[in-house]
Image: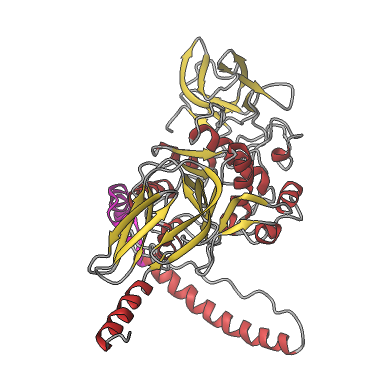
């Protein structure tokens, strides 16, 4: 039987409509769907087209709106290692597992690959040479697809996120999916959307308070002079570099340019949100368990907005965009390292700073924005938890990535999986002064307070009303530390580990986690 021209045309038109169904990069073979929650699936199609999504005995249908967007939500799924097929329209996505999905983001310490660290990290090296059938990886590249974790794919993936994922998957015994979006040397201001930043009240208040004191015109004039000088130096360097190449020699490094200057509340360079739109936006809405963040060295890049304030806008903005509530947000403490360890025989602590005697001069105040003290404040945001790094080894790019990942797993198990394990070191809860002594009480004491390294507890300084600090005597009494000094008969304040680096401070809990720097004063 011959079909009429009209019928053939209709069939071809219908086929073309169906062929227009398009999906985000997150929907590919080997993917992991998030367990225990309604699972979003979305894409685009011809306006008005019906798209059916089927998986694990469920079938949901949506109609594309006038812009072609459509979405459905599968009912909550249980964890499963069974490779199943997700059908979206006429597309079949094979080898789909159900478990937990974590997003990793930040700058170089999240971005750099496993292959960059295997030489200096034997634990990571050994782990990377294995296959993990129930661990799946999604790299940041625009054309990347989900991959099974094999020796060939592991080495190309984020060293930190892989170091977090493989022990977590083993501990949970469910599939784990890891999605990364990170770029080296980038500020936090690139990782939240323009709207997230502009609509945040705390950021607006910070800019309002900063603007009257900001000498933008002076800074811009200075920058203009330095930029002109740099342009001349750069032109000369280019000639030298070209000559060196012709002679088969390696060119010297180019001269470093001056730091650009932005107006109050504006980026010094680049555009707010530029990396969020490129690397995170494709993930937004995908069912996830939580986020692991490692960034801070490059701060915010927004004049007048500090890291703690901007991270509040970023964390809250991501959560609002995802629409999945206040999912766990784990972040790595900065700066990396700087403190001694409880047990140097543990693999994660093998590169920690060696314990040192107290310096003769009491250190000055730590950096207000880039210090362990500052980064602890990010935990004031709901369900946001710090991965302590002071005892894991230092460096701009700490080589102990397996240790950092293991510590992040310790935090995740406590806060995202309610395992009940301790995940923070002692934090000051309260203090009282009586009889020439200061009594400090702590939360996160775990199995009890302890000191390790040396023959006594140290790292505490004490001062009277004159604000002149001296090193103090300190002893542990139950869940408290008693601090005093014969030179300060009437104490007014105590500080602990009050420095950017503090390998001489040795208060821990018996769970092996170091105490966080603190002060009782506001001087």
Q: How is this picture coloured?
A: secondary structure
Residue range in magenta is 192-217
Front-most of residues 192 and 417? 417
| Residue at the image point whose x is 76% and y is 56% from the top | 119
Lateral position of residue 295 relative to residue 276, left or right: right
Q: Is residue 195 magenta?
A: yes
Q: Is residue 324 left or right of residue 458?
A: left
Q: In which image quadrant can residue 304 be found?
A: bottom left
In the depicted view, which residue is nearer to us: 118 or 378?
A: 118
Q: Is residue 292 visible?
A: no
Q: Residue at x 74, y 40 (%)?
A: 350
Q: In which quadrant will I find the C terminus?
A: top left
x then y, percent, for residue 38: 37, 45
Q: Decide if residue 14 is in sight here.
A: yes
Q: What percent of the width, then of the height, locates residue 277?
A: 40, 64
Q: Quadrant of residue 478?
A: top right
**Magenta run includes residue 121:** no
Q: Is residue 262 left or right of residue 362?
A: left
Q: Residue at x 65, y 38 (%)?
A: 391
Report the number of numbered marks: 0
Identify whether 93 is placed above or below 323: below
Magenta stretch: helix, strand or loop mostly = helix
- On the rendered image, what quadrant is the N terminus found in? bottom left
Which one is in front, 71 or 252? 71
Q: Residue furthest top?
A: 435
Picture coordinates of residue 178, whole percent (x, y): 54, 52
Q: Quick check: 438 above or below 511?
A: above
Residue extending farthest to the front is: 1
Residue situated in front as seen by the camera: 368 or 124: 124
């Amino acid at each position: 039987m011959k079909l009429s021209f009209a019928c053939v045309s209709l069939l071809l038109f219908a086929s073309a409509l169906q062929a227009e169904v398009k999906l985000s990069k997150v929907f590919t073979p080997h993917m992991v769907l998030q367990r225990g929650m309604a699972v979003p699936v979305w894409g685009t199609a011809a306006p008005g087209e019906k798209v059916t999504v089927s998986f694990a005995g469920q079938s949901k249908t949506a109609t594309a709106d006038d812009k072609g967007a459509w979405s459905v939500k599968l009912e909550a799924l249980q964890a499963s290692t069974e490779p199943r097929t997700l059908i979206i329209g006429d597309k079949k996505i094979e080898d789909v597992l159900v478990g937990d999905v974590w997003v990793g983001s930040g700058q170089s310490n999240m971005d750099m690959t496993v292959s960059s660290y295997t030489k200096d990290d034997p634990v990571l090296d050994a782990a990377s040479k294995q296959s993990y059938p129930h661990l799946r990886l999604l790299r940041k590249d625009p054309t990347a697809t989900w991959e099974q974790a094999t020796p060939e794919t592991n080495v190309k993936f984020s060293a930190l996120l892989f170091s977090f994922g493989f022990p977590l998957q083993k501990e949970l015994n469910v599939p784990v999916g890891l999605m990364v979006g990170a770029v080296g040397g980038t500020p936090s201001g690139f990782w939240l959307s323009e709207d997230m930043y502009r609509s945040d009240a705390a950021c607006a208040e910070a800019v309002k308070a900063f603007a009257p004191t900001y000498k933008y015109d002076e800074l811009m004039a200075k920058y203009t002079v330095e930029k002109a000088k740099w342009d001349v130096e750069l032109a000369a360097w280019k000639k030298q570099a070209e000559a060196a190449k012709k002679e088969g020699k390696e060119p010297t490094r180019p001269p470093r340019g001056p730091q650009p200057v932005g107006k109050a509340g504006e980026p010094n360079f680049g555009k707010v949100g530029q990396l969020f739109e490129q690397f995170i936006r494709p993930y937004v809405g995908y069912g996830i368990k939580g986020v692991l963040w490692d960034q801070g060295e490059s701060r915010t890049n927004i004049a007048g907005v500090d890291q703690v304030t901007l991270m509040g806008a970023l964390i809250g903005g991501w959560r609002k965009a995802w629409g999945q509530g206040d999912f766990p947000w784990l972040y790595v403490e900065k700066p990396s390292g700087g403190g001694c360890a409880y047990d140097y025989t543990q693999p994660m602590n093998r590169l920690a700073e060696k314990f040192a005697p107290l310096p003769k001069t009491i250190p000055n105040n730590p950096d207000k924005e880039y210090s362990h003290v500052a980064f602890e404040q990010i935990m004031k945001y709901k369900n946001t938890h710090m991965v302590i790094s002071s005892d894991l080894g230092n460096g701009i790019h700490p080589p102990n990535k397996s240790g950092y990942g293991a510590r992040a797993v310790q935090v995740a198990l406590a806060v995202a999986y309610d395992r009940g394990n301790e995940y923070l070191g002692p934090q000051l809860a309260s203090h009282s002064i009586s009889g020439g002594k200061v009594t400090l009480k702590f939360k996160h004491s775990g199995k009890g307070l302890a000191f390790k390294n040396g023959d006594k507890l140290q790292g505490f300084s004490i001062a009277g009303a004159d604000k002149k600090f001296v090193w103090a005597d300190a002893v542990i009494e139950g869940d408290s530390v008693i601090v005093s000094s014969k030179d300060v008969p009437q104490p007014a304040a105590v500080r602990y580990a009050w420095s950017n680096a503090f390998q001489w401070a040795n208060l821990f809990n018996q769970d092996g986690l170091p105490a966080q720097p603190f002060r009782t004063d506001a001087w």
